[in-house]
Image (cartoon, rainbow, N blue to C red):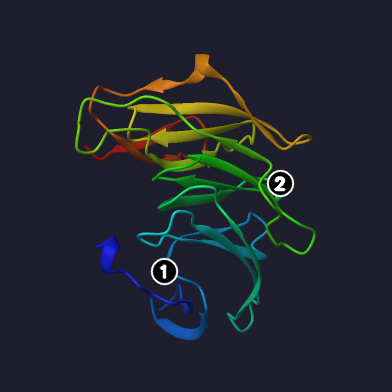
Amino acid sequence: HLKSSNAQGLRTYSFDLATGVIKFLHEMKGIDNPSFLAINPSQTHLYAISEVWGWHEGTVSAYSINHESGKLTYINKQPTLGSINAHVSVDQTNRYVFVANYGEGKGAVMFPIRADGGVAPFCSAIEHLGNGPDIARQDRSHVHCILPDPNNQYVWVADLGIDKIVCYRIDLKLGLLIEERARDIISDSGAGPRHLIFHPSGKFLYVIHEL
């Protein structure tokens, strides 16, 4: 349960595809309760969010990856503008990190990636309005996933609280999330969309509805 979670590190393991053997390699301590991870498309850096119960604002941390040793090297972190971080992803050009905040504050936040792989202060942030019919779970917006599409044109945001998968166009030059309301996907009332994933072909989007 999130209230009792207090992990303090990230562990790296090797995985042998031939034998199925998993072997511990390295542990990076010094991060509060990391809950979701994303590796950039070039596989040089890892981004982790800290989802800590009671914090008014979470953090997103950046690490470089040594593929020979499995060691992670800490670079920096940034505040996420919202509480209960739920998801993190990276755009296809290795230029931006996206964070979903489930709790209060900004639900969808976009961060530039620095030349060294670190995370710069946010460049775009969105807060949704509204609520769903489930009073206990849908009292307000609760963003649970933020995912760029394979073509890197749009970011899709699953909002459990308002029963919508909200679409934003990515402006790579200005670092902005721009509303594309005509592309929004409306879930069944009370369904609570949680996580998204694209088919490798890019033609299909799959959604888990938690409620």
Say what secondary structure mark 2 lies in: loop
Task: Tell me the residue at 37%/38% (across/down).
Answer: 142
| Residue closest to the eye, 146 or 68 | 146
Q: Is residue 176 left or right of residue 83?
A: right
Q: Residue furthest top?
A: 182
**Camera sees residue 55:** yes
Residue 33: mark: 1
Q: Amino acid at mark 1?
A: Asn
Which residue sits at x=45%, y=85%?
24
Q: Is residue 74 above or below residue 118?
A: below
Does 42 sit above or below residue 132?
Answer: below
Left/right placement of residue 128 relative to residue 176 reads: left
Residue at 46% x, 21% y is 184
Q: Three-letter amino acid code at disc 2?
A: Thr
- Disc number placed over residue 93 in the picture, else none: 2
* Residue 200 visible from this viewpoint: no
